[in-house]
Image: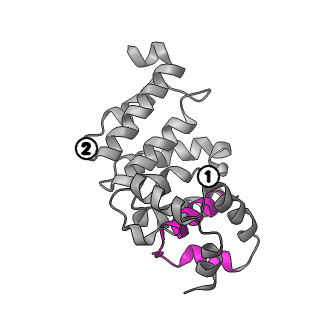
Amino acid sequence: MTNLQKRLFELQDKKYAEFQSRLTPGVDPSLFIGVRVPLIRKFAKEYIKEPEHEKFLKTLPHKYYDENMLHGLLVEQIKDYEECIQSVDAFLPYVDNWAVCDIMSPKVFKKNRKKLIEKIPEWIQSEKTNTCRFGIEMMMSHFLDEDFQPEYLELPAAVRSEEYYVNMMIAWFFATALAKQWEATIS
């Protein structure tokens, strides 16, 4: 067991691990430590100040679901856009569930929307379930407000997938689009 894993087990809530494993089908229940999201967020804010976090981000795959959650929360704190994109791209192939996918929302993306909109189609067109889901989520999070363009609706609309978690993200995207951009979405 690594030092980081020991630290995560110190924050363990076994009932939460059981609960979370039921919400995350396809992930072995024994891989849930059970660190509650507010605690792992707090831990990530502290851990990113430690030099060993850089090694952790480069050591993939991780064993535990909670390590993946931590990874996503560390990635979202990276301040350099290009470094963040590299970290996201390195991590996405190992994201095996909706919860880890959805927790990762890099703050640097907000200031770099012109670059981000060029990257999103690559993610959305991926055959990998959670990479596609992540791309649609980034489109929903960053391009349905002031930077909205009607053609942005075409990317998620063009996705054809049998994957439940991709289709749920498409539905979520269009529900949000209807709420924020009613006229453009219905036309």
51 shown above or below 137: below
Q: Tell me the distance, in whole angstroms, between the alpha carbons under discs 1 and 2.
A: 26 Å
Q: Of helix, strand and loop, which one carries label 1?
A: loop
Most distant residue in the front direction: 15
Quarter holding the N terminus?
A: bottom right
Q: Which residue is mark 2?
A: 161
Q: Does residue 88 appear in the picture of this structure?
A: yes
Q: Of helix, strand and loop, which one carries label 2?
A: loop
N-terminal of the two: label 1 or label 2? 1
Residue appearing at x 44%, y 26% in the figure: 175
Q: Which residue is mark 1?
A: 106
Query: Of 130 and 9, which appears nearest the observer?
Result: 9
105 shown above or below 179: below
Residue 70 locus on image (x, y percent) = 59, 65
Q: Amino acid at mark 2?
A: Ser
Residue 85 locus on image (x, y percent) = 55, 59
Residue 138 locus on image (x, y percent) = 51, 43
Q: Would residue 34 be counted in the magenta stretch?
A: no
142 shown above or below 97: above
Q: Amino acid at mark 1?
A: Pro
Q: Would residue 53 be counted in the magenta stretch?
A: yes
Q: Main secondary structure of the magenta part?
A: helix
Picture disc at residue 178: none
Query: Of 54 and 172, which appears nearest the observer?
Result: 172
Residues rendered magenta in the picture:
52-80
Q: Quadrant of residue 111?
A: top right
Residue 101 locus on image (x, y percent) = 47, 54
